Image (tube, rainbow, N blue to C red):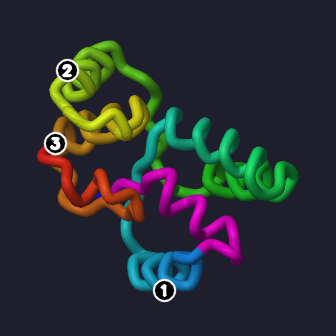
């Protein structure tokens, strides 16, 4: 199971993104894997993609994710509490709530691989 973060999705979505080609290659490399993401990540992709890139294309992109075999995890109260604990512990003011929720999901499900270009994913100790 591979977790997919907003930063990876946005790099795939936008051909002008500095990590676009890298995201495409990584996507091809892991195309037969099982993916998981969260409702929060998709909300962030919709918001940021629409505001910074192209709203109709972003909607089409997220529609394809929803139709794919990617598992989309809805918010769960226990994970919200765990994410809040992570959020409180992280010293940096630049780590988002969505990232903390993602870290809680990754820890809870014992996920070993996350596709992300967000440096916080590399630094996280979940």
Precedes in sequence: disc 2 or disc 3: 2
Q: Position of residue 92 (x, y in %)?
A: 27, 37
At numbered mark 2, what does the secondary structure look like: helix, strand or loop? helix
At numbered mark 1, what does the secondary structure look like: helix, strand or loop? helix
Q: Position of residue 11 (x, y in %)?
A: 57, 67
Picture quadrant of residue 85:
top left
Number of the front mark, 1 or 2: 2
Which residue is found at the position 62% from the left and 47% from the top? Answer: 45
Q: Residue at label 1?
A: 25
Q: Residue at label 3?
A: 126
Residue numbers of the magenta segment: 3-17
Q: Position of residue 6 (x, y in %)?
A: 51, 51
Gap between marks 2 and 3 measured at Cα: 11 Å
Q: Residue at label 2?
A: 85
> Circles 1 and 2: CB distance less than 8 Å?
no
Precedes in sequence: disc 1 or disc 3: 1
Which residue is found at the position 87% from the left and 52% from the top? Answer: 56
């Amino acid at each position: 199971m591979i977790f997919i973060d907003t930063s990876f999705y946005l790099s795939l979505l936008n051909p002008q993104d500095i990590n676009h080609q890298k995201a495409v290659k990584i996507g091809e490399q892991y195309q037969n894997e099982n993916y998981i993401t969260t409702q929060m990540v998709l909300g962030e992709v919709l918001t940021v993609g629409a505001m910074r890139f192209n709203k109709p294309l972003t909607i089409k992109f997220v529609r394809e994710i929803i139709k794919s075999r990617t598992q989309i995890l809805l918010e769960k109260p226990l994970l919200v509490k765990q994410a809040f604990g992570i959020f409180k512990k992280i010293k940096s003011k630049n780590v988002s709530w969505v990232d903390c929720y993602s870290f809680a999901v990754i820890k809870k499900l014992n996920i070993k691989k996350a596709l992300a270009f967000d440096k916080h994913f590399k630094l996280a100790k979940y």
